[in-house]
Amino acid sequence: MLQGSNLITLLVNLFKTNGFPNAIIPFAVAQVMHETGGKLDRPLEVQDFNISGIRFVGQKGATKGVTRPVKEWANKNIPEYYAKYSNYDAWAKDYKRILSSNRGMKGKPIEATNLQQFTDRLRANYYFADNPTAYGNALLKWLARIKNFMPNDIIPLLLIIFAIILIA
């Protein structure tokens, strides 16, 4: 099982290798930590290399993985599946594609300058169905938990993020 600082290191390295802007890396790490509970131990995450529960929609670099829960299907008679990747790098590329989308016309999550924008843009792009305030608060808690494990080039960005949150 991969968890804690080892998972954070894996994520940061994947995001840097795949060209994620440094400013977005803390948000992306917090979002993935929230989705996984801070550990990789489910077959979806370990065997299918799908860390964040991305749906399979025929996208490049993925194949049909395990069946999604029935409650998440758009049509209760048509099964939906999670994406299955060949490795975590393939997942990171697809995650970047998703964060680079502007389906909801509120901006691309990957270009967000603060956590509120990131959360609002994820929600507008149908990435999650939860209450946006509750989801954002969960990401904020993860940001606080992961800050000590971020590499030196990311720490100044986190300090700015927390300063903005305290002022707001």
Image (cartoon, rainbow, N blue to C red):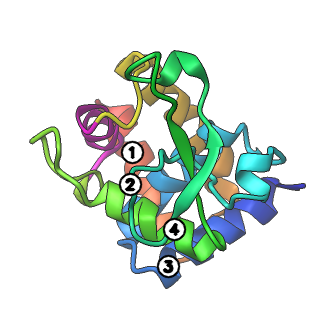
Going from N to C along the chain, the mark reached first, 1 or 3, is 3
Q: Residue furthest right?
A: 1
Q: Is residue 110 located in the magenta-colored stretch of the structure?
A: no
Q: Give the answer, above or below, for where 99 lies relative to 96.
A: above
Q: Where's residue 97, x and y in %?
A: 34, 64
Residue found farthest to the front: 77
Mark 4 → mark 2, Cα distance in angstroms = 25 Å
SS at mark 1? helix
- When the figure is inspected, residue 156 is found, relative to residue 65, above or below; the finding is below
Label of residue 16 in the image? 3
Q: Earlier in the sequence, mark 4 or mark 1?
A: 4
Q: Residue 119's x, y, as percent?
A: 34, 36
Amino acid type of disc 1?
A: Ala
Name the residue that disc number 2 marks. Answer: 160
Q: Mark 4: which amino acid? A: Ala
Q: Is residue 63 visible?
A: yes
Residue 164, quarter of picture: top left
Q: Are marks 1 and 2 in contact (CB under 8 Å)?
A: yes
Q: Is residue 151 visible?
A: no
Q: Indicate the position of residue 43 as horizontal and vertical percent values.
A: 79, 48
Q: Is residue 146 above or below residue 63?
A: above
| Residues packed near mark 4 inside 10 Å, few (<14), some (14 to 19) or many (20 plus) | many
The residue under label 1 is: 163
